[in-house]
Amino acid sequence: MDGGLIPWDEARVHVLTHSLHYGMAVFEGMRCYKCDDGRSAIFRANEHIRRMLDSAHIVEMTIPFSQEELVKACADTVRVNRLQECYIRPIAFYGEGQMGVSARDNKVRVAIAVWPWGAYLGEDGLAKGVRLKTSSFVRYHHNSLPAYAKLSAPYVNSALAGTEARKLGYDEALLLDVNGFVAEGSGENFFIVRDGVVKTPPVTSSLPGITRDAVIKILRDLQIPVVEQFFPRDAVYIADEAFMTGTAAEVTPVRELDDRRIGAGRPGPITRNIIEVFQAALHGRDARYSSWLHYV
Ligand code: PPE
C-alpha cells in the first residue's frame, strides 16, 4: 500500500477517503495462475496496468508510480503472500483531506490486494453454462461515464443489474446500451456465435476487456471468423452459442437468455474450443501466447 508491503489487517483508510464518497477510483482485476511447469504467472499484467494508467489519465488522476513499478508490486504482493494462484486487485484512489465532489488535491493512494478467488459465476455455470436475464438497468452512455476507464463509480450500474438478475433467480445480467443493443454483463464482455461466425459488440458501452482481446486473438489464430458488431437481444435468442469473458469469469458459456435456450442449451463446440486454448494459454501450455505471462 502506497509503495510498501503491510499486513492485511493494517490496510485501512479514513472514513473521509474522498473516493469512498464520490467513486473516483481506478482499479484492475488480474489473475495469477500456476503454470504446468510449477511457476506462477500473472495473465497479461502489463496490459492490465496499462489500462489502469489509461483509466487514471482519462479522469486526470496522477498515479505516483510507473507501469513497471506497479507490475513489479503486483508480482511482489503475490510472492510474499505465497499464493500460487490468486486474484489481484490494484486500486488507486483519492485519500482524505478536502471534501466536495471536485476536490482533486487529496493524496492519490495506491493499494494492491491479492486473494484466492474461485469461479466467478459458479463452478456449475463454468461447466454447463449460465442463465442470463436482460437487465432493466441500461448500460450508461460513454458521454456520461467513460467506457475505456475502469472506474469504481460505474460499478453501481453493474451492481444494480447483477443484483436484480440474481434476485430473479438468474446467474447474471445482460445489459443493453442506450440504443437497445447488447452491451455486456455486469462484469463480463459478451459474445455470440451463429453459423460459425463469432460476434461481439464494439466497445462503446462496455469495458475494453483484456480477456475479450485475448479471445479475439485466439479466434483469429483458430481461423474462426470474428466480427465486432451491434446486435439486439433477439440475436442472442437465436444464436447457436454464447459466452462471456472476463478476468474473474474467464470464458463462461451462456446457456439461456430470458428463459430462451441458446443453441443446444449447453456449451457449444466453438465455446469449448476457445476455453481449451485459453486455458492452455493461461497455464503456459501454448507457446504462441507466452508473451501474455508475467512470471512472479
Ligand atoms: N466488463 C465489465 C463491466 C467488467 O467489470 C469486466 C471485468 C470485463 C468487462 C472484462 O474485462 P477483463 O477482465 O479485462 O477481461 N470485471 C472484473 C471485476 C469483477 C468483480 O466483480 O470485481 C474482473 O473480471 O476482474
Image (cartoon, rainbow, N blue to C red):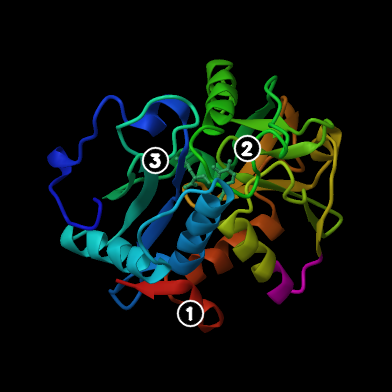
Amino acid type assigned to the residue bearing label 3 in the image: Asp
How far apart marks 3 and 1 lie (CA) works out to 41 Å
**Residue 143 falls left or right of residue 112:** right
> Circle 3 sits on which residue?
105
Amino acid type assigned to the residue bearing label 1 in the image: Ser
Confirm whether the magenta stretch covers residue 92.
no
Residue at horizontal 24 percent and vertical 65 percent from the top: 76
Label 3 neighbourhood size at 10 Å, few (<14), some (14-19), many (20+)? few
How far apart marks 2 and 1 lie (CA) works out to 28 Å
Query: Does the beta carbon of the residue at mark 2 sit less than 8 Å from ligand 1?
Result: yes
Residue 201: x %, y % from top left: 77, 48
| Closer-to-camera residue (258/95) | 95
Q: Secondary structure at mark 2?
A: strand
Pick whichever of labels 2 and 1 is earlier in the sequence.
2
> Circle 2 sits on which residue?
185
Mark yes or no: residue 207 visible: yes
- Residues shaded magenta: 219-225
Label 1 neighbourhood size at 10 Å, few (<14), some (14-19), many (20+)? some
Q: Secondary structure at mark 3?
A: loop
> Circle 1 sits on which residue?
290
Residue at horizontal 56 percent and vertical 33 percent from the top: 154
Amino acid type assigned to the residue bearing label 2 in the image: Gly
Residue 109: x %, y % from top left: 32, 46
Residues marked 2 and 3 touching at CB (< 8 Å) = no
| Closer-to-camera residue (272/294) | 294
